[in-house]
Amino acid sequence: MKNTLRHKPHNKITVIFTGLFLVVFLCLWPEKLLSAQEEPVQTTEDAPVSEEGIQELPKDKLVIVLDPGHGGMADDGRPEGGVYDGFIEKELNLIVAQAMKEELEKYEDVTVYLTRTGDQRLSLEERVNYAKSVDADFLFCLHFNLSKDHNTLFGAECWVSAFGRYYSEGYAFANIEMEALEKLGLYSRGIKTRLNDKGTDYYGIIRLSVEQDLPCVLIEHCHMDHENDRPFCEGREQWEAFGRLDATSVAKYFHLKSDVLGVDYSDYQTLDVPIPEGVMRPDTTEPDICMIEVTDQEMETGKITVTLSATDYDSGMLYYDYSYDGGETFFPRLAWGDKTQDTITFTIQVPPHIIPQIVVRGYNGYDLFTESNLVSLPSMDYKTEEEIAAELAEQERAEAAAKAVEEAEAAEAERKREAAKKHTVEVRRDPEPEEKEDPSVSYFLTVSLVCALSVIGMAVSMAMITKSRKRRRRRRRRR
Ligand SMILES: [Zn+2]
């Protein structure tokens, strides 16, 4: 054929055959190219069955849809989704989704779509319908959380459907995802289901996906408004890292491999979650047990050691918080820590001069709490660091004041000394008039002098009278 074509180009039959060949080739070629994306995904019924009888996912057909939560403006003119301290959730979600898509596309045999690539407002139906339109195998909804009162809840969580294979598939993926988020340093709030009043999935995106036979997981990466989580979501680099982490979890779950990344998750062990027969109901009851015991009270420092025993048979323990004013005010929630333990011990710093009344609340995986017994303790009259510092400052202030008085007195004494010196000199030159005597003193002196003179006068007169009488008597005797 080649030779005929080259050496006999004007042969009519050859030209017709060549033309026909080209037409057929050109018609078929673009279709082959497009089919990779547009051909409908094989349903599980058509999927090949492995030796163990488990249906294998048609890897070359895997379609993942990522749904960056929210977008656009709400009816009240504010951005859809959470907004806190300059962080706009819908923007974070999109950045995570874009990074997740980019990373996931490094794996083989996977096609990734985003429900939105800009800031458009989409209904939940539109999101799910779009995922169905591209024959998605799984829908991943990407979010960041806020707590109602802010700075209350912290940690990451995954929400899954409460029903059938949507539960088991969702849970198996979420298990990988939560493990990765915990490894990053975030606290796990768990993998949970939630139901509405009608007894169907609470979260619309999950409910609508399940209605359309599409597994769906909602990832709440962390709480943007809590100081514990903030270090994990402060900038673009970290949001993109979340996206890559999510992509890796998807790759592990679907046993993907990537030559570009040099990873192969073909043999990755995913958690075997049996398909539940009934509804996987959320926990709606408070922890079953919550009791405290004060095991130590340091009177000199105000440190109180509390042992807390709490149990929740349904969803386990998640947080605790404490009060030392009998439950009037509680300190921020703290992580339960090792969730396999029913008993934890912690220390409370109690201020002096109050009667501590210790109460603790234990929270389960669904943020429901049980309040403990109350323990009253004797008041501690130790000095706080502030008090010690204040006392020291007061002492320093008093010392400074005393020194200032001393200096002022010394200066005054010096001034007087100088003045006295000057006075002596002046006295020599021009004596100052003598100090005037008190008039009462001079009057007394005058009266005394007059009296004294009168007495003396009288005494002299008496003496003279007595003398003249004697003289007269002597003369009479001579006569
Ligand atoms: Zn959200």
Image (cartoon, helix red, strand yellow):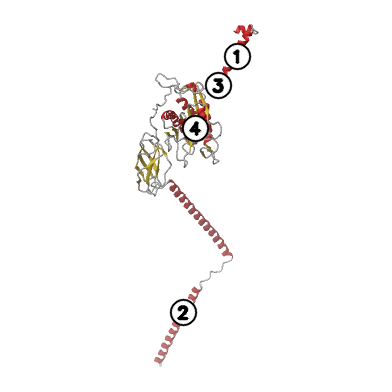
Q: Name the residue under label 4.
A: 142
Tell me whether circle 3 and circle 1 mark residues in contact (CB < 8 Å).
Answer: no
Look at 53% across and 21% down and name the residue there: 36
Within 10 Å of the Cα at label 3, are there few (<14), some (14-19), or many (20+) other Cα atoms? few
The answer to whether the residue labelled 3 contacts the one labelled 4, judged by CB atoms less than 8 Å apart, is no
Along the horizontal axis of the image, is 70 left or right of 376?
A: right
Callout 3 amino acid: Leu
Image depth: mark 3 or mark 4 in front: 3
Q: Is mark 4 within 8 Å of ligand 1?
A: no
Q: Which of marks 2 and 4 is nearer the N terminus?
A: 4
Q: Residues within 10 Å of mark 1 (few under 14, many from 20)?
A: few
Q: Mark 2 points at which residue?
A: 451
- Between disc 3 and disc 1, the foreground one is 1
Q: What residue type is labelled 1?
A: Leu
Q: How far apart, in angstroms, are the residues tagged by discs 2 and 4?
A: 122 Å
Q: Earlier in the sequence, mark 3 or mark 4?
A: 3
Question: Could you tell me if residue 241 is visible in this image?
Answer: no
Closer to viewer: mark 2 or mark 4: 4
Q: Nearer the viewer, mark 2 or mark 3?
A: 3
Q: Which of 92 and 218 is in front in this view?
A: 218
Q: Distance between the residues labelled 2 and 1?
A: 165 Å
Alpha carbons under labels 3 and 4: distance apart: 29 Å
Q: Which disc is residue 109 wearing?
A: none
Examine the image and state in which quarter residue 155 appears. Answer: top left
Residue to which mark 3 is pinned? 34
Q: Residue at x 63, y 10 (%)?
A: 15
Q: Which mark's residue is nearer the viewer, 2 or 1?
A: 1
- Is disc 4 surrounded by few (<14), some (14 to 19) or many (20+) residues within 10 Å? many
Q: Please say whether residue 408 is visible from this viewpoint.
A: yes
